[in-house]
Image (cartoon, helix red, strand yellow):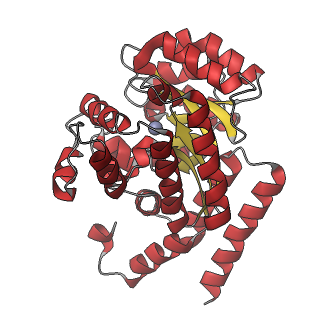
Amino acid sequence: MTDHLDAAGQVRDLHAFVAGLPKAELHVHHVGSASPRIVSELAARHPDSKVPTDPEALADYFTFTDFAHFIEVYLSVVDLVRTPEDVRLLTFEVARELARQQVRYAELTITPFSSTRRGIDERGFMDAIEDARKAAETEFGTVLRWCFDIPGEAGLESAEETVRMATDDRLRPEGLVSFGLGGPEIGVPRPQFKPYFDRAVAAGLRSVPHAGETTGPETVWDALHELGAERIGHGTSSAGDPGLLQYLAERRIPLEVCPTSNIATRAVTTLDEHPLKEFVRAGVLVTVGSDDPPMFGTDLNNEFAVAARLLDLDERGVAGLARNGVEASFLDAAGKARLAAEIDAYTETWLAS
Ligand SMILES: [Zn+2]
């Protein structure tokens, strides 16, 4: 946004405001949050991987041509996470990065199947994320919760394994709150995952599938009707369907919007064409997420700044966006009230100074 408004002192102020603003992050992926520093550390641990260890070569490696290429790169980083210690390190370092951005609460999307099928012991995996969660809360004060998602490209076997790990009382981690579906949408119809979502929801998990990122609004309808979606990951193509926007608005079903990700994967051609404004105009509750931040050269603070520019928001508007994240979260009522009050107090102090 500084590119557009670089003359104004207010822009720098807005960046500073965002940087200190307490926030909730609801759309961010575990492996997709691995910073170049972490990736290079993991790549050095596992020299047989194709992933470069040199930061400059890594930056080139992270430049995507399209969504399929992004998935390919993403999976090569997944392949670097091979031991419970790798999992623990990654999770803790992701929390450090969130804490740096004043994220007080995050629902981190984790794909356990990608790790367990590569041979990481299930128990070891669950213990590693839980250990990192507790350490991060103590050290940084950032509360982490998990969304276990099905990697759509891996088919129904992955769905079965993911729901089993999410619902088996001997494995299910304490921090798990929701159940998701990621990966490519083209050629991966949502309705086939209905039985797995039904089981997850019956076990008390909330339904948060990705939908309408690279396919049309019918995928979002499927996510709502077949998978019982309570929030939609992306939902970008909802913009083409006024009836869908009205449905989302009336039921307060949030869209988790990740603008820079949408450009990086070519889901949206340019930021100026991003439908965020249309969502807000239609009364849809929107939240801002960073998706796979280092891979897309962004972070949550930058996504707030991008959203502020797209929506032409001042500090109070940006604080409202942060409060949307709290409202759309799966925090309990007391946790929501506390974080919303913290956002308000920060905003009022900022504006008074
Ligand atoms: Zn995502």
Q: Nearer the viewer, residue 59 or 338?
A: 59
State the image quarter where residue 187 is shown: top left
Residue 256, position as x, y percentages in the image: 53, 42
In the image, 160: left or right of 215? right
State the image quarter where residue 349 is shown: bottom right
Q: Residue furthest right?
A: 334
x 38%, y 35%: residue: 78
Residue 167, position as x, y percentages in the image: 70, 23
Residue 323 visible in the current orientation? no
Q: Is residue 109 above or below residue 218?
A: below
Q: Is residue 123 above or below residue 42?
A: above
Q: Quadrant of the N terminus?
A: bottom left
Q: Residue furthest bottom?
A: 353
Q: Quadrant of the C terminus?
A: bottom right
Q: Nearer the viewer, residue 164 or 200?
A: 164
Q: Nearer the viewer, residue 33 or 3?
A: 33
x 45%, y 22%: residue: 117
Q: Is residue 74 above or below residue 133?
A: above
Residue 89, position as x, y percentages in the image: 48, 51
Q: How many marks?
A: 0
In the image, 347: left or right of 67? right
Residue 135 visible in the current orientation? yes
x 27%, y 41%: residue: 269
x 49%, y 54%: residue: 94
Residue 160, position as x, y percentages in the image: 58, 14
Q: Nearer the viewer, residue 88 or 108?
A: 88
